[in-house]
Image: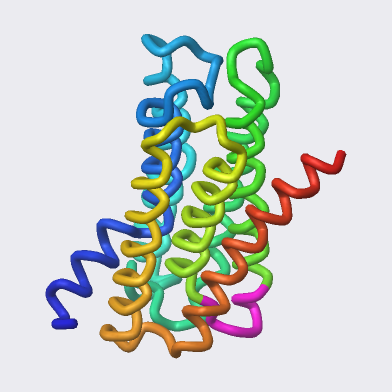
Amino acid sequence: MNRLLATILSSVCHPLLVPSYLFYVVCYQLPGVVLRPALPDRWLVLGVVLLFTFVLPSVGTALLLWGGYVSSLELRERRQRPLPLLLAVIGFSTATLMMGRYPQAFDMLLVQMMAGMTLAVLLTLLISLRWKISAHGVGMGGTVGLLALLYLGGEAGSTIIWWLTGSIVLAGAVMSARLALNAHTPEQVWAGFGLGASLVLGFGVGLALG
């Protein structure tokens, strides 16, 4: 894979953008999965997710760059990742609390998705204190895991198989892109993917048994 394509894939599928993509798919492309809010009001869900999981963490990271705490927005050095990841944890946690506070407005699946993503970012932060696990891998693993869970649940309609297949292909492309850019080793990429997928599937199984 050439570097230009790898850079585009890494940017478009940035870990802070993946939550917004997933919430869009669940809210608008998988009929019957989400009941609340009603379809005309689901822009509010995307607004909350985009603001707290992308805009605010991105602005915070840009301020860290301006202040000299990080040398690049790509965060290629492991020692520079904790502060931006901490900002992401705060943003994701805030979104989770907001949704969880209004169960009459937000479907429980949406709250569970946001809580699972928050846990994934927190674990990525903790692991990054010692080892440079791939956040892209975590995001793509979580995406595949969630769509697989919805597919196995049988409530997402016939289109879910195409979204699941597409997510698997995209995950492979993004992971290859991270390797092509020398941003991670294969172990770091696969560890990230495994963490994201196992968290979602474990979360789902736990809820089902509970």
In the rendered view, tell whether residue 11 sits above or below residue 40.
below
Q: Position of residue 158 (x, y in %)?
A: 41, 35
The number of numbered badges drawn on the structure is: 0
In the rendered view, tell whether residue 199 sits above or below residue 18.
below
Whether residue 51 appears in this view of the structure is: no
Residue at image x 30%, y 71%? 173
Residue at image x 36%, y 30%? 29
Q: Main secondary structure of the magenta part?
A: loop
In the rendered view, tell whether residue 124 sits above or below residue 90.
below
Q: Position of residue 61 (x, y in %)?
A: 41, 58
Q: Position of residue 186 (x, y in %)?
A: 45, 88
Q: Position of residue 66 (x, y in %)?
A: 33, 62
Asked whether, in this view, residue 172 is left or right of residue 102, the answer is: left
In the rendered view, tell whether residue 100 sits above or below residue 40.
below
Task: Compare residues 108 and 4 and report the one nearer the observer.
Answer: 108
Residue at image x 60%, y 52%? 89
Q: Quadrant of the N terminus?
A: bottom left
Residue at image x 59%, y 13%? 105
Whether residue 54 appears in this view of the structure is: yes
Task: Compare residues 162 and 33 and report the one nearer the observer.
Answer: 162
- Give the extent of the magenta segment: 127-133
Asked whether, in this view, residue 167 is left or right of residue 37, the answer is: left
Q: Quadrant of the C terminus?
A: top right
Q: Quadrant of residue 83?
A: bottom right
Asked whether, in this view, residue 148 is left or right of residue 68, the answer is: right
State yes or no: residue 18 in magenta: no
